[in-house]
Image: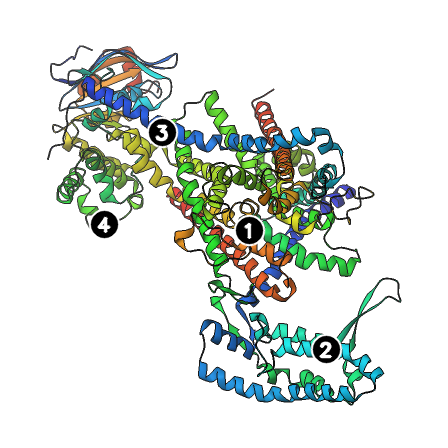
Amino acid sequence: MKRRKIVDWVFSGGAYCAVAVMVAFLVLVIGPVFVKGVGAYVFRGTVENRRMMLEQFGRGDSVAVLAEWAEVRRARQPVYDALRAFEREMDEMPSARRKELRAAFKEVKEGVAELLGPEPGTPLPALTRRIYGQTRWDRAKVKRAHILFEEQWDYSGGDGVRVLVPRAPMFEGTALALVFAVLEKDLEGLLRPRLRFYPQFLTDRSIDAHFFGGIGAEVAGTVYLALGAMLIAVPFGIVAAVYFQEYARGGPVLSFLRSCVNTLAGVPSVVFGLFGLAFFINTMHVSRGKSVLAGALTLALLVLPTVIRASEEAIAAVPRTYKEAALSLGAGQWRTILTVILPAALPGILTGIVISMGRAAGETAPIIFTAAVSVGPLVGLGDVLSHPTPALSWNLYNMCTEHEAADEIRHVQYGMALTLVMIVLALNLAAIFLRARVTRRLKG
Amino acid sequence: MSEQTGNAHVTAVGFSVFYGAQEAVKAVDLGIPSGEVTAIIGPSGCGKSTFLRAVNRMNDLIPGCRAAGKLMFDGEDVYGGNIDVAMLRRRVGMVFQKPNPFPKSIYDNVAYGPRLHGVTKRAALDEIVEASLHGAALWDEVKDRLAKNALGLSGGQAQRLCLARALAVKPEILLMDEPTSALDPKSTARIEELIVNLRGQYTIAIVTHNMQQAARVSDKTAFFYEGVLVEFAPTSDLFTHPKEKRTEDYITGRFG
Amino acid sequence: MRFAREQIVLTAGERRRRRAAAWAGRAVLFAVTSVAALAVLAIIFFIARDALPFFRQCGVVRFFASNAWYPTHEPPQFGALAIFCGSLIVTVTAVVIAVPPGILAAVCMSDLLPFGARQVLKPTIEMLAAIPSVVYGFFALVVLAPLMQDRLGVSSGVNALTASVILAVMALPTIVSVSEDALQASGRELREGSYAVGATRAETLVRVVIPASVSGIFSAVLLGVMRALGETMVVWMASGNAAQIPKPFFNLFAPVRTLTATIAGDMGEADQMTGSAHYHVLFAMGLSLLFFSFLCNVAGEWIVARQRRRMRGG
């Protein structure tokens, strides 16, 4: 008896744990995306950020920014002076000492250029990302650490262990010591971090492969693809649902069509991509190469079973009495469907559409070969039939695997992930509310 | 069956309805007199509803349902091959067991039928809606909220709205399939009052399993039992001097 | 106020016209429905059409039995055995990780938690099932992989285990949601019958409720398998993409390469060479994927049909 009770207790405990573990897992996955994703929209921006915004986007109060920039330049002058002074010092050093310090100095000098931007008066670099120093305070602190410490690997314990060795002692007594002291103590003075709200991240164009600016082109691409897919899938889906629910009379043809729809629901998403490439692009030639149209067609196929099922359920849930009433007033079958059944089923159908739209917005594999490009400008509405587009899902993948400086733009990646998740969750929340309304209404 | 009056509006001659192999209405001969209220009573499953729903061919919705014999309306067999079912249903209105207003506004509910049949002018629609709601004694209660959703009405109001909706297409016959079975006694009384008021303007056939109701509102009563029309007579006669043993057993409460 | 027509009888012409209209309407509906439904046949056809040249050129046996995947060598070699193994390893591991907690969580939601908690948890879980897979892949690559590398001391954070764990997390909501529906559907009478003879909750659930819902739970597991097998982004980003069979085969810390990731990864390079063997071999892989998911589908439908037969008595 006692043992049975213990078993019971353990089992229940295990079940509670399973739910807890599941929720924990999911929080663990979503948590970082939320926390860090917000960092793309709200962050501590430096004076470099304000300069960049002014010059690239024409945003901000130019007088104030220029005044601040002048102050900061004055504060930075000692750093640049110290660098030049140290270069002169180096020329007079014994060659052994010079050799010892040269490599380290080069890293420090490059680090300073990355941290604060090129020294005023020197020719401007070609890449936009090199024209400005660090625009974000968090990135600035990382860069400072690269200057202040040298990364070394200690293999004494067998496996390599990373150790950070301060560089300052190496340059003790030289002019460069000042640089380390200033960077350590007064980085705020050099960069002036200030809290920045950047809601335009959602709509801004990207500058220099997402180093600056926002994700407007990706958001637009995702919206085009999701809307386009629904535009194609919804008419087919609703017609098929009406046929299955109101017209079909059973028989082998019907059950065959039904199992076709079920099979379609199980096709892996990457296979849809292959099909889109082989059929829409290489056979039908809907466009020369990838395009929003080809991607939307492919995604439409992907969501079609969901739309059909949701619409069927919604139509089946319409009380028979509505149909009887319409017919008894002399409405034909068409009129009954159009004026009574579909309007009554509409909220349920909308729920399915909204959920499918979330799915279409989030899918990556079907658009890789049919619609998505890694870099590209915002596609205008007139070009959707023929042009490929960047999209949130694909560019998130691309930026964290293939971008040449993936580490430097983590905040953009997190921002994209958050935006994508928010779009999908917002659509799903809308579906939940819609469903709740339907349930309430059917209850009376 | 003796009461085959000359002014029958709907006439069944040897009329049967089958659900698959099962015969739900068996060779019924019945004339529903014009301008009067005819009650159809009988125990559950006796075919009374099936018969009623045959008149406007609502049974078509049921798979495997077919009819035999003749059911004449306006000189035509309702089940004839060349019948415009929609037009038939326009001229034969129906009120159902449970109030079934559409999830639309009160106005749109009533205007639904006229719109179907080609009335599009706002003024004409307004006129029909008001007249129909008056006809169903609902106008005073809803005239200030015609744009509100009809699902917000009480059960009794909803049923009167359904009646108004049926009246709006100006039918000649009103079929009522247990119209008060889902209503409380007060609402039931109002519907019965309406039926009495509508008598004369419309030919009314009402299926009910409430014998007092049949006695209160109808001129003639038909008693169905197991698909067969057992007796058809003026209501007062049928309830006081039933000719058939089965009728007597039923109305005295020995079964049903 | 009168309506346009009164006659209930149609003229012969009118009748013919209406019949034709009804028939045409029906035909249009049927045609549109057929296009929607038969799309899957088009998919099978076009994938197979582009897969066939590969089989004709390079042979079926080498594709399934050889381990040598050198698509860009001269001459190229297209042995996909290691890639099939990769898909198998990742899918099986993910399902093994996801199923026990998934079923337990479903049991907890259907039988242990109060009604209110379930009302909140269920839509939450459905929402989590909607989170795009590329976000899970991003998490695996940027958060989980470095963590494993630093803390567990594995040589590479992107490997079979990382991919499997993330796939399991992704498959969990589906498994929980569908199993919970199955458990709910088994009804209260069943549980009351068991409690009435003095069984504890665990005994009731394990001996009565779960066996009664086993076909629904099995469908849930199949759905999980299909999701894991067909998933592209997570495995592409988190599995390491090395076309080799791990040694020993249960070494989950080894990087693997799956069918889906190969298709996604190689088609980008192959799209300039439409018509090459490399292009066609990816369709051969797509065809294999289609085949597996079709098998899962058939198995699922068979289970549902069998259950229906059993419910009907017999």
Q: Disc 4 is attached to a residue of which chain?
A: B
A291 relative to C248 in the view: left or right: left
* Residue C88 place in picture, x, y as percent: 71, 39
Question: At 67% across and 52% down in the image, what residue appears?
Answer: A21
Question: Depth-wise, is mark 3 or mark 2 nearer the camera?
Answer: 2
Label 3: which secondary element: helix
Residue tagged 3: C28
Tell us which disc is closer to us: 2 or 4: 2
The subunit letter for the residue under badge 1 reads: C
Residue under pointer 1: C124
Q: What percent of the width, then of the height, locates residue A316? A: 41, 34
Dividing the picture into quarters, in which one does residue B104 lie?
top left
Disc 4 is placed on an element classified as: loop
Pick whichever, A145 or C162, lies toward us.
Answer: A145
Q: Which quadrant of the view contains residue C311?
A: top right
Q: Give the labeled residue for mark 2.
A: A106
Quarter of the figure with the C terminus of chain A: top left
* Three-letter amino acid code of the residue under disc 1: Thr
- Which residue position holds label 4? B145
C87 or B175, which lies in front?
Answer: C87
> Residue A275, percent across and down?
54, 38
